[in-house]
Image: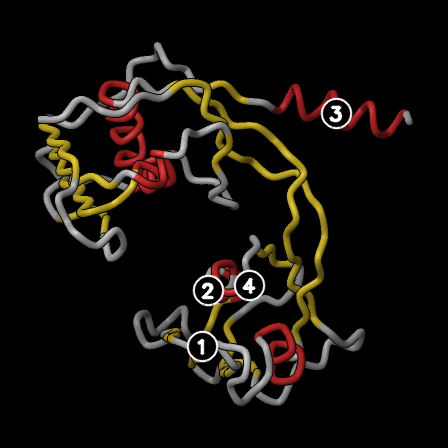
Amino acid sequence: MRIVATGVFALVLASVVFAQNAPRPAFDVVSIKRSTAVEHGGGRSGPQPGGRFVMTNGPTRVLLNSAYKTETNEIFGAPGWVTSDNYDVEARAGHDLSSGELALRLQSLLADRFKLKAHLEKRIRPIYELRVLRADGVLGPSMRRSPIDCEAQRGVCKTDGGDGVIESNGAWIPAFITWLPYRVGRPVLDKTGLDGYYELKVTWAVNAGDAGPALPTALREQLGLTLVPVDAPMDVLVIDHIERPSEN
């Protein structure tokens, strides 16, 4: 009982309220309009050269995840329109932005135009830990240390992926893991203890009935890695207040 009570108290203390009144850099120009696209899906979003951010036919959820990055991308307390209503957004800063600078300007945009008030909160969430399968550290037949000096030969080592395949001539494991969460439906943390760069290829069946193993099985059989389900405290975004934006 003592451990549980301590954990709950720690979660409460770990709740971080965003400083809504603190001055943050803002975009010079912002345009937000309800999307007129017939298709609900198929939108795109992201930074553009010259300090621009563009979202076409995308939901407010995309803006929230871009402004407040968490390992799970989970949002709690948001009304349904945050996912269902699509918008066209164009914002300009007048100069190139780092990812951190872009996030701060998106936070300002959300606070100004969506009247957002939110906070980060630690919650116990289901995740996967990626571990080496064998106790002796031997990897699978489709994974070995890269013969390329990826540090010295910048741009030579690349990782590519598509439906049912991820292949690399020199993958850094923390970067390789970023390919996994949306494919397995949970955040994935690196617990392999592997350093350096690895040549690897993993193939799996995308749909039930397709030839080949499921991704977790493919990771075990081909790379010698295993996904272990665990529950762990993770940052999630909690919405305290949000309104549909004023359009212009």
SS category of the residue bearing label 2: loop
The answer to whether 43 is drawn above or below residue 63 in the figure is below
The part of the image, by quadrant, that contains residue 111 is top left
Residue under label 3 = 8
Query: In the rendered structure, which disc, 4 or 2, sits on the residue that comes first in sequence?
Result: 2
Q: Nearer the viewer, residue 231 or 175?
A: 231
* Tag 2 residue: 179
Residue under numbered circle 1: 166
Q: CA distance from mark 1 to mark 3?
A: 39 Å
Q: Nearer the viewer, residue 196 or 110?
A: 110
Q: Are marks 2 and 1 in contact (CB under 8 Å)?
A: yes
Please name the colour scheme applied to the rendered image: secondary structure
Q: As shown in the figure, which amino acid type bears the numbered disc 1?
A: Ile
Quadrant in the picture for the C terminus: top left
**Please, is residue 119 above or below residue 205 in the view?**
above
Please tell me which of labels 1 and 3 falls first in the chain.
3
Q: Residue at x 13, y 34 (%)?
A: 33
Mark 3 belongs to which amino acid?
Val
Residue 192 in the figure: left or right of residue 41:
right
Residue 218 falls in image quadrant: bottom right
Name the N-terminal-most of marks 2 and 3.
Answer: 3
- In the rendered structure, which amino acid carries the disc numbered 2? Trp
Quadrant of the frame with the N terminus = top right
How far apart marks 3 and 4 lie (CA) works out to 28 Å
